[in-house]
Each structure stands twice: as structure tokens, then as C-alpha cells.
Image: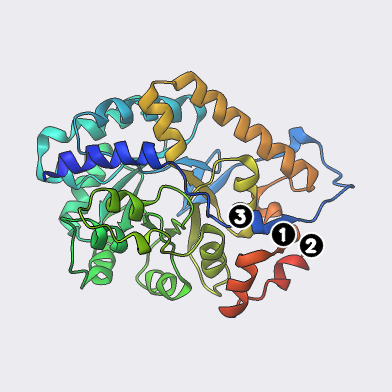
Amino acid sequence: MSRTSRKREHVEHALTTGQSGTHGLSDVKFVHNCLPDLAMEQTDMSTCIGGLALSSPIVVNAMTGGASETYSINQSLGIIARETGLALAVGSQMAAIRDSSLVETYRIARREHPHGILFGNLGAEATPEMARRAVEMIEADGLQIHLNVMQELIMPEGERDFSGALRRIEAIVQAVDVPVIVKEVGFGISRETACKLTDCGVAAIDIGGRGGTNFAQIENMRRAQPFAVLNEWGISTAASLLEVATLEVRPDIMATGGIQTGLDTARCLALGASCVGMAGVFLRYAVDGRTEEAIEYVNNLHEELSVIMTALGAPTIAALQRVPLVITGDTYHWAEQRGINCKVFAQRS
């Protein structure tokens, strides 16, 4: 099967399967503050990721690219990001690196969002030269390198050799003049992996936890003999956030994996993320051509987040990361087994 046909199938199956809802963020409970001493108009949602200033902590995250049909999707996403002031990440650009006729399916995002923050995207198999071409292709402000080992292993025509990936990532970090963000695609990043990535100089980590678009399930839908036992593989979004955010030395964090509400966003930010990425929900808006509804959705997210920040007495993202919260359920048990002290979050002020 061609790469283009595979990308088309990924979009179709992503829309069919939706979000798995196993992100674990409901295990994170805020301690209510009935004396916040703050006006809602004082809340400031600006943040930074990898040295890049964002006016909002919400990012339209990488979804698709490399098929003729995705031109209109990336065009819609570019319009949504422009009208709401959000950063936007395109899907893997490897298809356009190999076939120049597909370049426009990515460049349309920059044309629609000419002054916004745009992230390029390649897999860990990329060379430094490919990375430079990906950045130049869309005038990217940053570059995502995605890790998708389990997806590739389940994929019928997927990769089976992952040796040398860390060395290639380090070479890309040294070769490009934009911040490099390493991201998972839905299976989470552990603290051990995060340490290795930090040591090789990545500017930020997108934890890509289990709970959003399920690429194990998507690839199993494409197999004659599915590995259904692997559909729930991975570290949840909440647990992966704890894994990375509690490191003594860590890069900036983008949280992704099933986030759809202002409350989910607030929970991720309070756990230590600098921003959150949303993909599946925006993919559906883009495919259906519901741009105005998507803009309204983002405005509602911002208002919901502002309400929560006000109720907690947190005027900024940094202040939100100091409010007390209680971690319960499976996420608490995961943290306990991994040596992560949840009381630190519950007793901070």
C-alpha cells in the first residue's frame, strides 16, 4: 500500500474510532478555593514552549499530511488557528520529502496562518537534511519529531528496526535552528525516555499519552490478523505527565492525549505542562468543514479555562502550577509504584 493511501485510511479510522477516553485526568482533583482574590479579567493564559511565546496554552496538534485529500484539512486547520491565535502543528512531512507533489498539502497551513506559530513534523527515521527541508517547507518555528514504535509494529507495512533513533534526534537538534519537540503519538513517554531526550538537547517533550486517538486500534483495523490485546497499550496522559513533570531536570512539556475540555487543560497545566495539544477534535471540525463551530469551541475552551483559573485564584499558568491538587485512582497507584510522591501536589500552595 502506498504512503498516501495509508494516510487516507488513518484519517478515516481516526474519525471512526474517536477518543479512547482513558487519559486518567479525572483522577486529578483541584482543591477548591472560596477566597481566590482575583477578577476573571486578570487571568493571563500566555505561555512558552521551547522558547516560543504562545498567546494560548492550546495547540492544534499534528494530525495528517501526505495525501491529496489533506490539503483541505490543513487549510481548515490553518484558518482555525489563525482566527483563534493558536499554534498549529502539521502532520508528518516525510511524504512531501519523498514526493514534492505533496508539498502544497503542508504549505497551505502557512499560507492560511502566515504570522502564527507553526510546527513541522517528521519521524525519528529522518536525517538532519530532511529536518532542514521540513522546516524550510513551511517556514516552521519549531520541529516535532514523533515516536510511534507500537504503531509501526502493529502496522502491517510498518517499520521493524528502531535502532539509532536517539542519535538521529540528537543530530537533528544540532542541525536545525528552531527548537525540537519530541512527541509520542498516543502511548506516553516515561521518565527514563524523557531523561535521554533531555540529555540530547531537545527543547520540549510532547508526552502524547494514552487516551486520545488510538493508533494501536487504528492499525489493528487495517490488519488481517489483529493484535487486539495491544489496543490498550501505553501510559495514560495523566501518568505520563507525572513521569516527566517530576524530573529534577526537565524540558518544557506539551500534554496531549484525549484532552477536550477547559478542565482537562487546567489539570494538565497544573500537573506541569506548558501547553496542551488537541488533534482529534479539530480533525473532525476540519473534515466536516465546520470552521465557525471550531472557532466557537476554542473561544469556549478559553472561557472555561479562565473560569477555572479565577476560581483557583491563579492569574497565570505559573500560578496554576502552584495550586494544590489531589491525585487519586489508577493514576495515584501508578505514581506510587513508580516512586512519584503525589503528596507534593496536594500540599503545595
- Residue 349's tag is 2
Q: Distance of mark 2 from mark 3, alpha carbons? A: 21 Å
Q: Quick one: label 1, few (<14), some, or many (20+) residues within 10 Å?
A: some
Circle 1: element type:
loop
Can you give x and y, in whole percent of width and height, for residue 344 in the image?
71, 71
Quarter location, residue 181 = bottom left
Residue, disc 1? 322
> Is the residue under label 3 in contact with that under label 1 (CB below 8 Å)?
no
Q: Which amino acid does label 1 sit on?
A: Arg
Q: How many marks?
A: 3
Circle 3: element type:
helix
Residue, disc 3? 25
Quarter location, residue 135 = top left
Q: Quick one: label 2, few (<14), some, or many (20+) residues within 10 Å?
A: few
Can you give x and y, in whole percent of width and height, for residue 94 in the image?
19, 47
Q: Which of marks 1 and 3 is in front?
A: 3
The residue shown at (48%, 24%) is 83
